[in-house]
Amino acid sequence: MHTYKSLIIKGSDRRILYVSKLYEGKVADYQILKSEFAVHQDWFKDKEVRIDLGFEGFGTDYACKKIRKPHKKKRVAKGQSNDLTPQQIEYNKEVSSERVSVEHCIGRMKQVRFIQQTLRVRRLPLLDKIMGIAAGLANFKIS
């Protein structure tokens, strides 16, 4: 069974702004972003970007107004503490609470049953169209 995933960009108004083509499930999220949006261009120059830890290196490859990314525990030698500070923990809670709206967008797309069921369709262009239709219906639902 093949698993696929795509990159979804959500706007501040809860609308899905962009859905990438489908990629094999083992492709990293940041690799999808780099293949869809050429590096060192001004795609996000005037945007505040919220990303998760899977997009390591985003700040060096893309220019943007502000990046909101959670703090990660550092790898340290055995016996040493790698705990986050209370300020970092609080910041991570804020960032993760913003992530909820992204999950709600994905959930609205999944209300189109084709997205979450196992399909026999193996033609990627057709599956890409189905994803686009699901995003359009999700946007229509909130308008």
Image (cartoon, grey):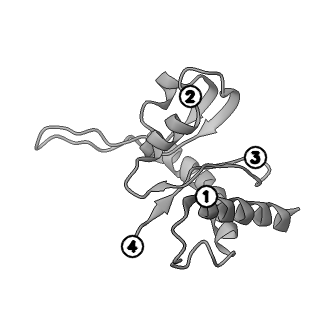
Is the residue 37 above or below the residue 26 in the image?
A: above
Q: Is mark 3 on a helix, strand or loop?
A: loop
Marks 2/3: CA–CA distance: 23 Å
Marks 3/1: CA–CA distance: 29 Å
First reached walking from the N terminus: tag 2 or tag 1: 2
First reached walking from the N terminus: tag 1 or tag 4: 4
Say which residue appears at 89% left-offset and 62% top-offset.
143
User: Residue 80 at what x, y percent from top left?
Assistant: 16, 40
User: Residue 12 at what x, y percent from top left?
Assistant: 75, 46
Is the residue 2 above or below the residue 37 in the image?
A: below
Residue occupied by mark 1: 125
The reply to whether the C-beta atoms of the residues labelled 2 and 4 are less than 8 Å apart is no
Residue occupied by mark 3: 12
Q: Say if residue 36 shows up in the picture.
A: yes
Label 3 packing within 10 angstroms: few (<14), some (14-19), many (20+): few
Marks 3/4: CA–CA distance: 35 Å
Q: Which mark is residue 38?
A: 2
Q: Is mark 1 on a helix, strand or loop?
A: helix
The amino acid on which the numbered mark 2 sits, given as a three-letter code, is Ala
The reply to whether the C-beta atoms of the residues labelled 2 and 3 are less than 8 Å apart is no
